[in-house]
Amino acid sequence: MAAWDLSVIVEDLGADAPPITISVTSDLHIGGVILKLVEKMQIKRDWSDHALWWEQKQRWLLRTAWTLEKCEVHADARLVFMPQHKPLKLGLPNGLTLKLRACFSNPVFQTVMGICRLLNIRRPEELSLLRPVEEKKKKKDKDLSEDIYDLTEVPLSSVSRPCLYNGMPAHFADSDKLEAVYKMLSVTQPLPAPEVIAKQYRPASVVDKAHINGRWLDSSRCLMQQGIKENDRIWLRFKFFSFYDIDPKYDVVRVTQLYEQARWAVLLEDIDCTEEEMMLFGALQYHISKVSQSEPQMLCSSAALDDLETALQSLEVKMEGESSSASELLKTMTAPELNDYLKIFRPKRLTLKGYKQYWFKFQDTSISYFKSKEESIGEPIQQINLKGCEVAPDVNVAAQKFLIKLLIPAPEGMNEVYLRCENEQQYAQWMAACRLASKGKSLADSTFQSEIDSIRSFLAMQKTNGSQGHADASDESINPHSLVSPRYHKKYKPKQLTPRILDAYQNVAQLSLTDALMRFLQIWQALPDFGLSYVVVRFKGSRKDEVLGIAPNRLIRIDLAVGDVIKTWRYNNMKQWNVNWDIKQVAIEFEGNVNIAFSCLTADCKIVHEFIGGYIFMSTRSREKSEVLNEELFHKLTGGHEAL
């Protein structure tokens, strides 16, 4: 075979160094090319992390056994010989920036797994990388150089669970400096100054919120293919809001970073909440910052005990699985009943003015109502099936207002219904029942009681204790503007906010640090808009732009003009979804011959495809399946045409 010259640029020799030319034949494999190259350079060092990057084709030549002919490399190919792992500036949810080595040659999904392994964050499939929002450069801010914590020397291990030493991964225990960095990852950050909150970018509308989702990197392509260069800045964030198996004992960093992301979402009004909820979030932040300064965070746990615990848990799962069929039968025979007088209001119906009282009956996943208890033997006035509906609380404990807002799917959109409860007790039961029914579960479900308890504890936290007990806390300097979003900075003076936050604080002051963090996350997850990622789309046949909200279990169509939910589609009713990559259109088919199609305006349709496929992947995880992540399934569901 005829020999020909191939010139290769070696990144390590510097930008001005001439390319190195080697003589090759078309049947030489990639490994042989690298060998010739290294021999010609005569530089003694470890080249094992280096590989060839083909610039015109924007891809790595990682299959060393393939020949140049099979890779279709000819003499005009611009090849660069460079390391596969390079430093990146990684912005974390808590606002810190780390410099670490990340893999530029594997799909981003694996790069994130490597980063999470290094930082000791379990369940890396829930996180991803996105391009940061560009900050406007001001001339005044020249002297503000930010701290970057360097982790580039830390070796990336291939072990899925790093061995812990003193409660932290062994690779952080090598030096005091690294130990300090781990502490910053696993301890919540001090409260931000009000100026810092005010300076941050705040989305003013749903469209603004939609733009951030155009910045996610593609999980199935590598960093190099997406134009990310060495030392570029990139953000690590939780992308899929379905948090599996959170265990505060192992997940110190994961819980802390999740709390930071949730806290900033609340402070920057990324997610809407009521004034009462904001005061409670404020009180929890105040408590967490107070406790985390005094409580040492490093958790020590004995490995043997942990193994025993895991073994017991998996045994429990197996036993549950075996006895479930018999217990299911028993449950359906002895399902609890829920009947009571409630008031109902339907804003869209002109006939029903205001709230009217009826006798309500809850059965399976439906609510029926009758004129009175005596008439409940006959036909109901109406039966409403709650499966697939949206349930939102509208509660003000101080004013004794306990409303349940239901959005019920109908052929032409969503029908709105409000149920008014008399007291907390009644509200907790009916709210829990509605939440379960919306997921297709009946009152016989084992989680019914725990759902009631969590609603009750949430209501208890919103109760105010009058003025007693403020003395101990008000001596300290509490700056309420560090605890609530800027909207309340404008609305109230600090001296008006302080007593309200301290009132809420009375209810959480006894919580330990871990419990307070978990409670914050629990209340955040209970917000009606929790877990929604927005994209501006144009539905097929429609003339105007609308917003698609992608949630862990459903898709929501939102009218841009009014901001109302027009329609909800659940993933568990989805039969299939396709993407037409040429015209960039996503088409989805649901049960009952429901077909929708839309093109994406603020994000690539690959991002939407990855969100939907990703959430379906998240729902397949279970304890019975092994701890190993089914990466192949993730790529099948999210990869698009390149993956096939």
Image (tube, rainbow, N blue to C red):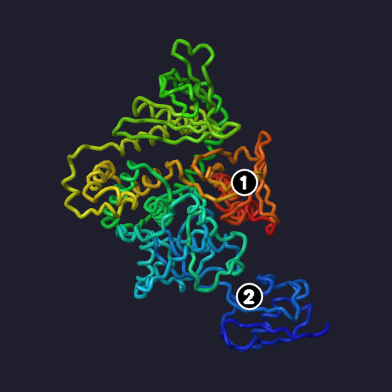
Nearest to the observer: residue 603 or residue 218: 603
Q: What mark, if any, has residue 393 been given in the picture?
A: none
Q: In the orientation shown, which residue stands out farthest toward the top?
A: 374
Q: Residue 227, image x and y in percent?
A: 58, 69
Q: Is residue 330 visible?
A: no
Callout 1 crowding tier (Cα within 10 Å): few <14, some 14–19, many ≥20: few
Q: Amino acid at mark 2?
A: Ala
Pair 1/2: label in front = 1
**Label 2 crowd (10 A; few <14 / some 14-19 / many >=20):** many
563 horizontally vs 223: left or right: left
Q: Residue at x 68, y 35 (%)?
A: 593
- Residue depicted at 66% across the width and 88% down the height: 40
Q: Are marks 1 and 2 in contact (CB under 8 Å)?
A: no
Q: Which residue corresponds to mark 2? A: 51
The residue identified by callout 1 is 543
- Judged left or right of residue 620, residue 355 is left
Which quadrant does the C terminus fall into?
Answer: bottom right
- Name the kind of residue labelled 1 in the image: Arg
Q: Name the secondary structure under disc 2.
A: strand
Q: Residue at x 67, y 46 (%)?
A: 587
Q: Residue at x 52, y 49 (%)?
A: 534
Q: Mark 1 or mark 2: name the one nearer the start of the chain.
A: 2
From the top left corner, tell me how far across and down residue 635 is, in percent: 63, 55
Disc 1 secondary structure class: loop
Query: Quadrant of the rendered structure where residue 172 is?
Result: bottom left
Residue 427: x and y in percent read 38, 29
